[in-house]
Amino acid sequence: MTVTVPGIAARLADRPDAIALIESRKGTSRTTRRGELVRRCHHIAQALRDAGVRPGHKAVVMTRDAHDLTAVSYALGVLGAVPVLIEPRAEVGRCLEDIAPDVFVGEPLAHLGRRALGWGRPHVRIPLVTGPAPLLPGRRLATRVPVGSTPLPQVREPDGDEPALIAFTSGSTGRPKGAEYRHATLAGQLDALTTLMGPRPDDVLLAGFLPVALLGPLLGVATVVPAMNHLAPARTPPEELVGPILKHRATIVLASPAVLTLIAGHCARRGISLPSVRQVLSFGAPLRVRLADALRDVVPDDAEILSVYGATECLPVSAIGDHDLRASRVRPPAGHAGTCLGRPLPGIHARILDADATGCGEIAVTGPTVSPAYHARPDADAATKSVTGRGVLHRTGDLGRLDDQGRLWFLGRKAHLVTGTGFILATEDIEAAADTTPGVRRTALVGVGTAVCQLPALCVELLPSAPRATALEAVRAVVKDHPEGHRVGALLLHPGFPTDPRHNSKIDRPRLAGWAAKRLRGRLR
C-alpha cells in the first residue's frame, strides 16, 4: 500500500513570515523566513533541473554554509533527487565509491578537494559550485538570489518508501557507511523529535551541529546556526556559541558534550546565565553528571537537560533527564552498571541480543526512526539488519542492558571491549565510575597488546587546574572500589584525548591504544 507523507514544501507552508534560519557570523546575523526559504527551494530546484539533475539522481551536498546546505538539500528533495551528506573529514573518496553520485554540489573548497583527490571520478557528471568561486571553473548554483511572490508550483507529496536522504556515519569505529533514509524514516525522526522537544511556535533552536539546520525548520522552530568550526567543534570560540544564545534568546540548545562544555565553561568564567533556555539536548556521547551540573548552574531551575541516545542509523532512541541521571549513579543496577540512557521513546523498541549472564549484550532497535539499509553495502546490512514483525531490527554495535524499569544502560562499543586472559571488560562500566573523580575531565579504558590477552590500561585526562598527584590518587581509589577495577593493569596520564571529527566527543580509542602501547612497551615484553 502506498502511504504518502508530508513533503518539505508542505511542512514549511504554515507561518510563511516566521523565521526559518538565522546564520550567526562574528557578531552579525542573516535571517531567512519560512516563505522565503520555500521559494528559494523551488528556484534552486528549477536551476538544478536546468543543469540536468533528475529525480532519483544521488547528489552529494558538501558545504559549511547552513543556508546552502538546507536550501539545496530541500530543493533536491522537491525535485525528487536524493541528497547525500558526508563528513568532510571522513574517507570521502571511499564514500563516493559506494554512492557513485551523479551530482556534486559544494562550496569551492569541497570542489578543490574533489578535483585534487579525484573524489567521485568517474561518476560525477554534474558538478555545481555554491558560494563565491571567482577562480574555480564549473557551473555556479545561485542559492541566495531574490525570488518574487509568484505562485508556487504544485508538488507531489512523496511516497513514504521513496528514498529521501543518505547520511554517512562518522566512521569513528570503522569505515563510514551511508545510511539510507526513506521519507517515512525522516517523518518518523521528526515525529520522535517533536515528542522529545515539544516545539513551540516561539521556540528558537541553537544548532550545535550543522545538519540540525536541516531539521529545525521542518520541526517548525527558528534555527540559529552559530559560527562554529565544523571541522573541529571543540575549537570553536565559545563566545560564538554563547553570544547567539543571548542575542536571539534561544530556548533550545542541541549540541554534543564537547560543545556544551564550551558553553558551560564560558558562562562560568564570565558569570553569564542563559535565562531564555528551557531545554538542553546533549547527543553524540554520554552526558556526564559533572557537565550536567555545570549546565544546571547557568540555565533556569525549571529548564530540562536531556542526554539523548541514538545513532546515524536510528536517531533518536531514548533520553534521560539530568535529575534521573544523577539518581541512576547513586543506585545503579546489579551487575554491570555503565551509564543510564533512559527509556526508549514512544514507538521505539529496544532489545538486547546475545546477552550474557548479567543481561549485557548488544543493543538492537526497531521503530520508525530506523534506517532500513546501508547504501551499496550488503555486507553491512547482513551484519546489522534483520526483518522482524516490528520492522527492520538494527544492531547498533553498542553494548548495554535493560533494567527492570525498562531503562537502557550503555556499557560501551562492542568493538572497544578489552579482552584479557580469562576476562572481558566493557569500557563504560569502569569509565562512568572513574569520570566522577574530582579533577578528572574524562577517562578511557583501552586494551594494550594482542586480543584475548590484553593489558587493560586506563588513560586519564585531567582538568587544567587539577593537582596531578591528588587526582591520580583519587582515580586509583575509585578503580580499586570497582568490582572489576583490580583488572586494570596501568594508569596513564594523557594531555588531551584524540576524538571523532564530527562531535569531538567520542574518544578515538584505536589511536589512544596505540599511544598507550608505546608508553607500556617495556611492560609488555
Image (cartoon, rainbow, N blue to C red):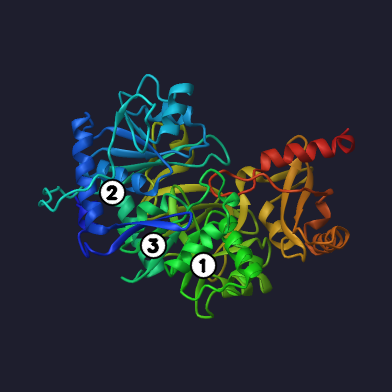
Residue 456 in picture, x, y percent from top left: 78, 46
Query: Rounded to the nearest whole Å, what is the CA distance between mark 1 and mark 2?
Result: 27 Å
Nearest the viewer among 75 and 524 is: 75
Residue under label 1: 306
Considering only vertical position in the picture, is 244 above or below 75?
Answer: below
Residue under label 2: 183
Check contact, mark 1 vs mark 2: CB within 8 A.
Answer: no
Query: Rounded to the nearest whole Å, what is the CA distance between mark 2 and mark 3?
Result: 15 Å
The crowd level at tag 3 (other Cα within 10 Å; few <14, some 14-19, many 20+) is many
Find residue 83 and name its label: none
Nearest the viewer among 461 and 370 is: 461
For image coordinates 63% across by 53% down, the residue present is 356
* Residue 390 shows in the view: no
Nearest the viewer among 515 and 392 is: 515
* Residue 207 shows in the view: yes
Q: Residue furthest bottom?
A: 301
Nearest the viewer among 79 and 325 is: 79
| Number of numbered labels in the structure image | 3
Res 23 → quadrant:
bottom left
Helix, strand, or loop for circle 3?
helix
Considering only vertical position in the picture, is 70 above or below 378?
Answer: below
For image coordinates 48% across by 42% down, the residue present is 169
Amino acid type shown at disc 3: Leu
Work out which quarter of the rendered image holds the C terminus and state it.
top right
Amino acid type shown at disc 1: Leu
Helix, strand, or loop for circle 1?
strand
Helix, strand, or loop for circle 2?
helix
Q: Earlier in the sequence, mark 2 or mark 3?
A: 2
Residue under label 3: 193
Q: Earlier in the sequence, mark 1 or mark 3?
A: 3
Q: Earlier in the sequence, mark 1 or mark 2?
A: 2
Residue 464 in picture, x, y percent from top left: 76, 58
